[in-house]
Amino acid sequence: MSKTKFIFVTGGVSSSLGKGIISSSLAKLLQSRGFSVTIQKFDPYINIDPGTLNPYEHGECYVTEDGAETDLDLGHYERFLNVSTSQSNNVTTGRVYKTVIEKERKGEFLGKTVQVIPHVTNEIKRRIKLLSHNDKYDFILTEIGGTVGDIESLPYIESVRQLRWELGRENTLLIHLTLVPFLSAAGELKTKPTQHSVKKLMESGLNADILVCRTEHELTKEIKQKLALFCNVDVESVIQSIDASTIYEVPILMKNEKLDEVVLNKLNIKTYNKTDLKKWEVFVNRLKFPEKKINIGLIGKYVELQDSYKSILESLIHAGSENKTKVEVISIHSEFIDANQINKEISNLDGILVAPGFGERGIEGKIEAIKCARENNIPFLGICLGMQMAVIEFSRNILKLKKANSTEMNKSTPDPVISLMENQKNITDKGGTMRLGAWECKIDKDSLAYQIYNAEVIYERHRHRWELNEIYKNKLNKHGLKTSGINPKTKLVEIIEYPKNDWFIGVQFHPEYKSTVECPHPLFVSFVKACLVYKKRINNGREQD
């Protein structure tokens, strides 16, 4: 019998209540007690993965070490637990149905009629239990996407019902996250939405063991008792999740609410260590009470939706805390950048970060922002497309190749300084075919990148099709744009820098995917530090004037 305990997290009333943050917080608390924990996300949409979804539609596509394009919640899991996830940690309805249909085509069902129950639910259960092989984890938390009552979620809810019966109540636990709204007109919190949500859950054959209630105001003892009575849980199992100033405060709040203690008691686990969140509390304290402040411009074309650049924003938070600095991110839409904005806003920033992306829209604005950073010695970090735009800017303004471009934006450009990777040229399917996952990079010892990483060989995660054109590499180097990081096997340029400036780096990979609370990414830490130095130098210059 497996020793692994399964904890399921469902949501009700409304989407975006924070199931991922609650799951990550509980996992962190259990981890801090010495347990081995992982989290997986089951999404009810029919896409195979988020790789082909528009960022406006779904937010950021997060990439794991093994190259899985996953839901952005896996980023939260890794940032909280400091443990890598994989292909197995994110499953969609599309992936489930694809597997079932492939089995049917191979004749594995022996001619039987293929149905949601048992064939689809069996596949869901198989995938839920996949991570429990070899008893590697004490706890596996499974977050079910969407809300209870959604037609798309029904097979997952049914699968959880079956698993609870098969594995036994002593090995499974169900947490239901719901909303207790405050009606200002009535001046009180309302429990009815939660009651209806739990009733919907019960209609599907599931009883919640623990209620986690999102709220703007403290839950009174009377409200907790009312929720316990109507929702078939004990009062200790009604957990308040009040709005926090930062998501990183939630594990501390959940500790105060004794969520992990309730979980361990309900699973009849008697032996465990005390919670140790000392490092976490230091991080949060630095975050809430910074000593300094800087303004960094995030130049991108999806800035209207903050989730589009979720990992970048969180990485800047990690690096800010490490530097005891509040990083104020100024989101700037690259499509609308003009000379006036360059002169009045962008040139006055303490640092400029040009974000990843795809397609032609907004690239000229990114190029102008990079030019401003290079000419004014403003700390600059370009990520993926941001690095490629830095190469184009340099080629146009220093190499005098006025029509230099990427073949992604202009297939007939006379100077394709950025070109499609050779192994991408015959690919027609868009999903899961980019250069994905962790790849090796060898760093030149005589470079800023080497000083930052303090290592000659690193592994970083990728998600791209285009690359710096090898034909132009020597010319770029000769005129001062250093290619300081190279993949030893493919010869792909991974890092560029401009040594003439104090801090000017572009990377083909996505460092934001590897930054965690416990291990802030060195590139972001160094970038924020450089922004502090730059701000101090500029302010000192103004004082002297």
Image (tube, grey):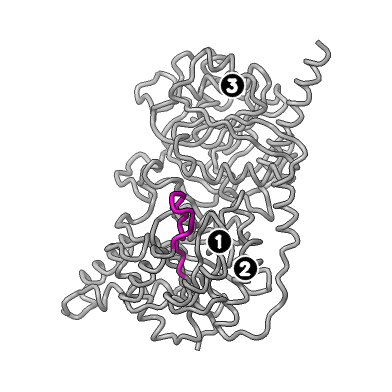
Q: Position of residue 65 (x, y in %)?
A: 53, 56
| Disc nearer the start of the sequence (1/2) | 1
Q: Mark 3: few, some, or many residues within 10 Å (few <14, many ≥20)?
A: many
Residue 391 sits in which quadrant?
A: top right
Which residue does the image show at 35% across and 67% down from the upper left?
Answer: 196
Residue topped by disc 3 = 346
Name the one closer to the observer, 474 or 359. Answer: 359
| Disc nearer the start of the sequence (1/3) | 1
Residue 112 sits in which quadrant?
A: bottom left
Q: Position of residue 128 (x, y in %)?
A: 42, 72
Magenta span of residues: 176-190
Give yes or no for residue 181 being in the magenta stretch. Answer: yes
Amino acid type of disc 1?
Ser
Mark 3: secondary structure: helix
Residue topped by disc 2 = 257
Give yes or no for residue 459 being in the magenta stretch. Answer: no
- Give the CA distance from mark 1 to mark 3: 39 Å
Which residue does the image show at 74% across and 31% down from the upper left?
Answer: 532
The reply to whether discs 1 and 3 touch (Cβ–Cβ < 8 Å) is no
The image's mark for residue 241 is: 1
User: Image check: 327 left or right of 356?
Assistant: right
